Image (cartoon, rainbow, N blue to C red):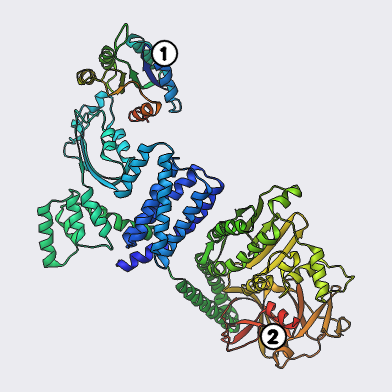
Amino acid sequence: MSENSIRDVFLEEAKEILRHLEADLIQLEENPDDEVVHRIFRYVHTIKGSSGIAGFDEVYEFTHRLENLLDAVRNKKVPVEKALVDLLLESMDWVAEAIYEHANAERKKFLDEKVASFGSFSAKEGEAVLARTENVQAEKPANYFLVRASFKPTIFENGIDPLLILEDLVSLGSVEHRRVHFDKLPALRDMDPEKCYLEWTILLKTFHPRQKLDEAFLFVKDDNDISIEDVTNDFTDSERRAGGIQERKVGEILVRRGVITEEELDTVLSIQRETNKKIGDIIVEKGFADEKAVQQALGDQNRIKSRIQATTVRVETKKLDTLLNLLGEIVISQSSIARMAEELEEEQGYRLKNALYGMDRITREFQEQIMAIRMIPIGPTFEQFRRFVRDVADDVHKEIRLDIRGSETELDKTVIEQISDPLKHMIRNAIDHGIETPQERQKAGKKPVGTITLNAYHQEGNVFIEIIDDGRGLDRAAIRRKAVERGLIKGDEEINDRQLQEFLFMPGFSTAEQVGELSGRGVGMDVVRTNIEALRGTVELFSEPGKGTTIRIKLPLTLAIIEGMLVRVGKNVYIIPLLSIVESLQPVRDSIKTVEGKGEVLLVRDEYVPLVRLYQHFGIDSDFTNPWEALVVVVESGTSRIGIMVDDLVGQQQIVIKSLDNFITKSRALSGAAIMGDGTVALIIDVHGMVGEIAT
Amino acid sequence: MKHILTVDDSPTVRTSVEFALKGLGHAVLHAENGKDALEKYNEVKNKGETVSLCLVDVNMPVMDGITFVKEFRQIDKFTPIVMLTTESSDAKIEEGRQAGASGWMVKPFSPEELVKIVSKFVR
């Protein structure tokens, strides 16, 4: 593992931690319980440790100070208040910047001073003594003590349990290395269970002064053989310097920790010069120390490495995509075998088909598993909005609580990446237009603090995401006025729910103008809908005056594979996503009409839907030109329906989508292509796009 | 049931011990002197329960703390005994250690200090 990969691991680790940290900081302000404070402390502590190892010295230095401040917060010497949370958030921003962009020195100085001022504040408040020890800590990151404890055999007879003393000692810091000396342990038959035979050597890393360690041995240090040696200097230098894992150092560390002797190391080094083996291996071979001790000697450097290796394997998403693509190819090959099976003689064909069914089951499961790898929980995406809601609410002088539900709901990684922006826009809308000011809320008999709820859940192969606010709801009258103004409806016409949604999602139908208080930000709900439809999802909006608004996004579980209906037009096969299909029918002659300005329409269940003759749309030949001879597939996008005229339905199949490059087609009506079992290519109809094309 | 035995002729000390150790999950038993303490200890034992720790004053009427420790060690080698006293001379501490005391704590004490010491001996 090179220095660079340690850095990469750190970058990944830090990203995760910073995200958690942000959420927790917001929570700290809302609900400052000890658990949260402790978690925040731990996160900062982890960043400190890792940044030092990864070579981010400035981050290390800064987080170290921050850690001290947080320690004071943890010990209730510094109160949790808004100013503190602000400072911590700012600090976190700086850390993120320093890690991912560049360390802004001026900003750091500014924050350093602020952090320090919080520290001194605590000193003024009382407990000057404790604040002073903090300052000592600030200069000295950690102390290392080598503790040798050899208790007298009769220790138990004084009512003293060495184990409790050792536990006490360990609670002061972290055990970097531990060695139990078994030398005095007699054979089992000679052992007196009332006697203590063991001795311990412990290397303790602690922020406490030596005095604390002495206290742990308070009652035993006089008549037992206890030695405490300060070996801090042996460690801090190397810890600071350590940029990567250096093979040569393992030996030195082991010597320093008393695991092997100086002479033994010399022997090892001379062997190493001759054989060019790894030092650790030589030490183990020679029996100077066991493998465990060598591993432990890698200490901090190794810890990050092993932690990550043990729990997860980080894989590029591209590799998963490739895997999925390959699986797609398998599915295709499989269907071509299935076609061959159809052509075979009865008995043989039957057997082959049976075998294929079995294989089909496995590939399906295989596919589900790969999809599961691509699925990640939406929690972190939701959490990142805590900060956003807090900041924006502050800006507009509103009090808003963000309620997050269904964090564990999993979505395709690609979807998660692309859903963030639309979500942000909708949350922004809810803050700006949905939630009222505290005064307005109180006047309306509501709690002054508004709530925005982000909710996610799975239902019937789809993922639903809801943005719910308990604000004022949509202003129907204003929307109606606007619609009349733009000539969308007549002056005396009422608008129904479906129209209401349609208007809101129209380009240029700015929500800002409805309430007339905040200017639009250039991105409207129409963009939100486009983004979501690009993910093959839909948006719905429900609103109740005075009670709030709910926006519900429905997304497919995955983007790569769909259930498709194969339809035939002339010699061409097209695929219509099954999810979009409402019904298929053969129309009667009377149900088809031509309406001025709208073109051909078809009466389906008392509703007129535009009719699209696919052969006309794509300019190809077809078997039928009369709709009453052909079939019509009624599809739905959002709240609009259209009827697609085709020659025949071929069948239903799982389709692996291959995207089409922009230079192949400009048509919005196609979303991609799929390779069929017989090797031919079928184009996939993008229902949302086609509805859009028809509308314009 | 686990007990902590506080042995002191001053009810104030015993009560403050009981108060300080509230929450450690032990019942605190009071004894006025060494003799009383041995009786209380036997009562507990006879009920099949255990004494986890004794906190014992040195200077008491009837039976003093050092004598109590010596007597106690005759019947129980392993239960920790912490002396809780105003005595702080090395000689006295050594005497206590020889008798079989596990720890020595000088009065007056704060509740936190007491909890800290006690938790070195019992979980």
Where is B30 relative to A461, above or below?
above
Cα distance in 3D space between marks 1 and 2 = 98 Å
Q: Indicate left or right for A401 with A227 as reference.
A: right
The answer to whether residue A181 is above or below residue A156 is: below
Q: Residues within 10 Å of mark 1 (few under 14, many from 20)?
A: some
Location of the C terminus of chain A by quadrant is: bottom right
Q: Which residue sits furthest top?
A: B62
Location of residue A476 (image quadrant): bottom right
Percent position (x, y) of residue A452? 65, 55
Q: Which mark is residue A568?
A: 2
Task: Tell me the element at label 2.
Answer: strand
Q: Nearer the viewer, residue A581 or A347?
A: A581
Q: Secondary structure at mark 1?
A: helix
Q: Quadrant of the N terminus of chain A?
A: bottom left
Q: Which kind of residue does numbered mark 2 sit on?
A: Arg
Pointer 1 chain: B
Q: Which circle, 1 or 2, is nearer the viewer?
A: 1
- Is B51 above or below relative to A266? above
Give me the residue at 81% from left, 89% from top: A626
Total numbered labels placed on residues in the image: 2
**Residue B18 picture quarter:** top left
The chain to which mark 2 is attached is A
- Residue type pointed to by label 1: Pro
Q: What percent of the width, then of the height, locates residue A297?
A: 24, 54
Q: Nearer the viewer, residue A245 or A159?
A: A245
Percent of width and height locating residue A483: 80, 72
**Disc 1 designates what residue?**
B11
Depth order, front residue of A283/A363: A283
